[in-house]
Amino acid sequence: MKRISLLIITMALTFSLALIQGCSKEDPANEGKPDPIELTYSVFFPPTHIQCLTAQAWADEIKKRTDGRVVITLYPAGTLTKAPQCYDGVVNGISDIGMSCFAYTRGRFPLLEGIDLPLGYPNGTVASMAANTIVQEFKPAELSDVEVQYIHAHGPGILAAKKPINNIDEMKGLKVRATGLSSKIVKNLGGTPVAMSQPETYEALQKGVVEATFCPIETLKGWKQGEVIESVTDTSAIGYTTSMFVVMNKNKWQTLGPDLQKIFKQVNLDWVKKHGQAWEKADQEGREFIKELNRQTITLPDEEQQRWKEAMNPIFDEYLANTKAKNLPGDKFLARLRELIAQ
């Protein structure tokens, strides 16, 4: 009996020793590799939105090009930080990276407000490339508390409403969802701007809190808002955009080191165009979505378009006056933007 017990104890000890030795051996594939740097990425778009998918593709590309040394986890739909708090969330380290709109924090980015002006952007690619280029060239001090990865921007904003809007006179008193500078567009057209983020807009239209929204046409599908409007007025004559940032916490950026920073910068250059193309694709899908829903599309006559353009003049004048008062080069910024759009 003692021999059997001794044998059992010996076997158990041998098995335990083998298990410990096996666990202590490193996987040859990971031998010599440090643990990956894990980063969090707060995105306000819902997970199915093409811009969220493009952000995920960016994160995947970073992982690929860094050979797994950097792993980025997305938190879509404002689950980590809500859209208006996203920028501060990056500054304060709530997330390592963030994507949202400059327009959600009015007054904080006075020079960059020029990007969103109704300059007649033709599409998302032009808007994204122009926005990214001008931020790189001017390096605004208002972005000094983060490390900018890149900027992108949607195609021309249109007016989607719960009733047909055929001319500027019908804008009088209309409650329109708008953010940032688009709220000034609404005001100058005679409407009443109501500030809110995209995630809030569907319910606001559905319940009549607002009667219309200024947005890129892709929004009508991407955020399903086409379901709760009846008509679309093509206002591309005053085509504004909403510029969006992808920024990283400064301290986190500095810990990456020069080699990883270089890879980020290379990927970023590719993704400016990818986001622009994604905006264009989404705009086309938005048009098709509206057509499927049998929503009315209104094209303004040339004379009416001119009335809408003239209504925008005070916005440009105000921007130039405000930036001058803050000793910011608003005039040069605006002139360069027009050059970039024309190019």
Image: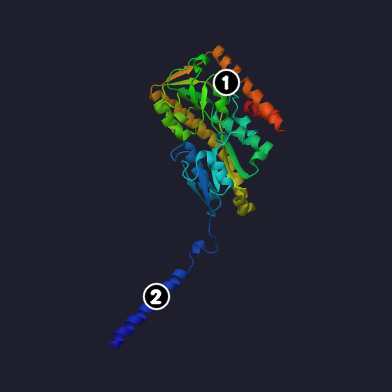
According to the picture, the residue beneath numbered tag 1 turns out to be: 188
Q: Position of residue 259 (x, y in %)?
A: 62, 52
Q: Position of residue 2 (x, y in %)?
A: 30, 87
Residue type, mark 2 in image: Ser
Which image quadrant for residue 162? Answer: top left
**Among all residues in the image, which is located at the extreme right?**
327
The answer to whether residue 240 shows anywhere in this view is no
Closer to the camera, 310 or 7? Answer: 310
Q: Position of residue 155 (x, y in %)?
A: 54, 29
Q: For the residue labelled by badge 2, is the local secondary structure a helix, a strand or a loop?
A: helix
- For the N terminus, the image quarter is bottom left
Could you tell me which residue is drawn at 55 percent across and 63 percent down? Answer: 32
Closer to the camera, 183 or 15? Answer: 183
Give the crowd class for mark 1: few <14, some 14-19, many >=20 residues within 10 Å.
many
The dot on residue 16 is: 2
Relative side of 198 to 332, left or right = left
Q: For the residue labelled by badge 1, is the local secondary structure a helix, a strand or a loop?
A: helix
The dot on residue 294 is: none
Say if 157 sits above or below 144 in the image.
above
The answer to whether residue 195 shows anywhere in this view is yes
Closer to the camera, 23 or 325? Answer: 325
Of callouts 1 and 2, which one flags the residue occurring earlier in the amino acid sequence? 2
Which image quadrant for residue 313? Answer: top right
Residue type, mark 1 in image: Asn
Is label 1 or label 2 in front? Answer: 1
**Among all residues in the image, which is located at the extreme left?**
1
- For the C terminus, the image quarter is top right
